Each structure stands twice: as C-alpha cells, then as structure tokens.
C-alpha cells in the first residue's frame, strides 16, 4: 500500500466519522424540535381548554345575570302592579271618606227666597215632612213638622216648617194651633216670602173661629204691611165680603 493510498483511506474514514457525527446532531435537533412542537401543541391545547372553560364560565355568568335581570324585571313589574293597586285602593278609600264626609257637611239651601246653610239631615227631614203634607196625610204631616221644629229649632228651614205646620193644622181644623204656628213664622222672619200668606191664613183661621172682627183687623194689617203681595189683593176682596 502506497503512502497515497493510506492517506486517501484516512480521509475517507474521517469523512465517514464526520458524516456520522453530523447525522447524530441532526437527529438530536429533530427530536428537540419534535419535543418542542409537542410541548407547544400541549400548551396550545391547554390554553384552548382554559379559554373554552373561561368562555363557558363567562356564558354561565351571562345567563345568570340574564336570569337575575329577568327576575328583577318581574319583581319590578309586580311591584309596579302592587303600587298601582295600592294607589287605586287609596283613591277608593279617599273617595269613600269624602262621600261620607259630604253626608255630614253643611250645604247651601235656597228655599222661599232665602239662602242658608243646613245639615244634610235637616234637608232630608224637612223634605220628608213636606212630602207627607203633599200626599194629603195632614195628621202625619203635623207630627213630622212638630218633630222637625223641635229637633232643628235654629234651622233655616224653621220658618217654612211653621208655615206648613200651620197649613196642616188648618186642614185638620185645629185653627187655634194653626194661628200660633203662623204667628211663630211672622215672629221669626217677618220678611219671609211666605209671611203675607201666613197673615192671610191667620185671618182665615179667625173667620173659621167666628172672630170676624179679628179677621178684619188682620186683613187690614196684611194690606198695610205687604201692599204689593198677592195675599194683600186677596185680603182686599175678603174685606169687601166681610163688611
């Protein structure tokens, strides 16, 4: 073997060793790359799972919030309905209270040319008594008006009540009491719209009692006191017949 041959063999052995060593290096790099890739994939998988769990948790939280919101809205709607119902009940109660109070509050009354304040009970009882009179039940009307004048002695209805009481007694021929009732009206309210009629009624009672002198005197007083009244015109005719 020549020197050249030996050198060539040595070079070939060296190249083979280097090649083998380079192959080993390449295998290590490949394995590390594979390990790194697998590690990255595992990390990505874990990150993906964590993200999915986070998204699921977030979705659950959103659903829980929606449920809470829906429940709160339902509660608010129920509360609004309850408040509305309470307000309605309060209005009903207040209206009922107002209506009950109005039953006792004085009211303005206009009767026989006079205006006055009266309790609702006064108005009711007076109208009830007058209704009995107009039905022609004069005995019952007397009882009703007597009761009224006792119960409501200071009432604005009193003069009119005495007028109708006098007429009820005249109708039952209780002339003396009728005269007293008419005189009570004149004492309480000489300017009352019914005053001229009351004076004429006194004269009529006196005629029925055969007190013609007293009747003429009463008729003369009527003409002088209430000259423009219809009762005064009737008094003049009555005087002409009594003379």
Image (cartoon, rainbow, N blue to C red):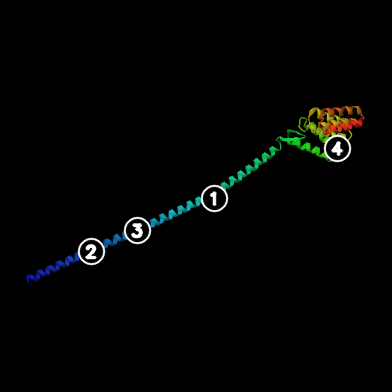
**First in sequence: mark 3 or mark 4?**
3
Q: Is mark 3 on a helix, strand or loop?
A: helix
Residue at the spot of label 4: 138
How far separated are the C-alphas under marks 4 and 1? 70 Å
Residue 131 coordinates in the image, percent (x, y): 81, 39
Residue at the spot of label 1: 74
How far separated are the C-alphas under marks 2 and 1? 70 Å
Placement of 26 over or under 130, stated as above or below: below
Q: Is mark 4 on a helix, strand or loop?
A: helix
How far separated are the C-alphas under marks 3 and 2? 26 Å
Of 175 and 194, nearer the camera is: 194
**First in sequence: mark 4 or mark 1?**
1
**First in sequence: mark 2 or mark 1?**
2
CB contact under 8 Å: marks 2 and 1: no
Residue 18 coordinates in the image, percent (x, y): 17, 65
Q: What element carries label 1?
A: helix
Residue at the spot of label 2: 26
**First in sequence: mark 4 or mark 2?**
2
Which label sits on residue 234?
none
Q: Residues within 10 Å of mark 4 (few under 14, many from 20)?
A: many
Q: Which residue lies furthest to the bottom in this view?
A: 1
CB contact under 8 Å: marks 1 and 3: no
Of 124 and 80, nearer the camera is: 124
Q: Residue at x 50, y 50 (%)?
A: 69
Placement of 37 over or under 160, stated as above or below: below
Q: Can residue 6 be seen in this view?
A: yes
Q: Residue at x 67, y 39 (%)?
A: 98
How far separated are the C-alphas under marks 1 and 3? 44 Å
Residue at the spot of label 3: 44
């Amino acid at each position: 073997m020549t020197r050249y041959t030996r050198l060539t063999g040595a070079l070939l052995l060296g190249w083979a060793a280097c090649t083998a060593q380079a192959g080993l290096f390449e295998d290590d790099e490949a394995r590390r790359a594979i390990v790194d890739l697998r590690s990255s994939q595992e990390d990505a998988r874990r990150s993906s799972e964590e993200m999915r769990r986070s998204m699921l948790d977030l979705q659950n939280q959103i659903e829980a919030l929606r449920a809470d919101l829906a429940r709160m809205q339902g509660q608010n709607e129920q509360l609004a309905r309850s408040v509305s119902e309470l307000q309605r009940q309060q209005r009903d109660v207040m209206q009922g209270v107002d209506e009950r109070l109005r039953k006792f509050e004085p009211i303005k009354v206009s009767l026989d040319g006079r205006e006055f304040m009266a309790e609702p009970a006064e108005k009711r009882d007076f109208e009830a008594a007058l209704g009995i009179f107009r039905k022609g039940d004069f005995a019952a009307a007397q009882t009703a008006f007597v009761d009224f004048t006792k119960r409501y002695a200071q009432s604005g209805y009193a003069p009119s009540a005495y007028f109708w009481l006098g007429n009820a007694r005249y109708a039952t021929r209780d002339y003396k009491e009728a005269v007293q009732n008419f005189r009570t009206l004149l004492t309480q309210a000489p300017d009352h719209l019914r005053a001229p009629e009351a004076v004429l009624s006194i004269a009529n009672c006196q005629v029925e009692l055969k007190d013609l002198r007293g009747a003429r005197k009463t008729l003369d007083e009527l003409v002088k006191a209430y000259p423009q009244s219809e009762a005064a015109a009737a008094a003049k005719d009555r005087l002409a017949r009594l003379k």
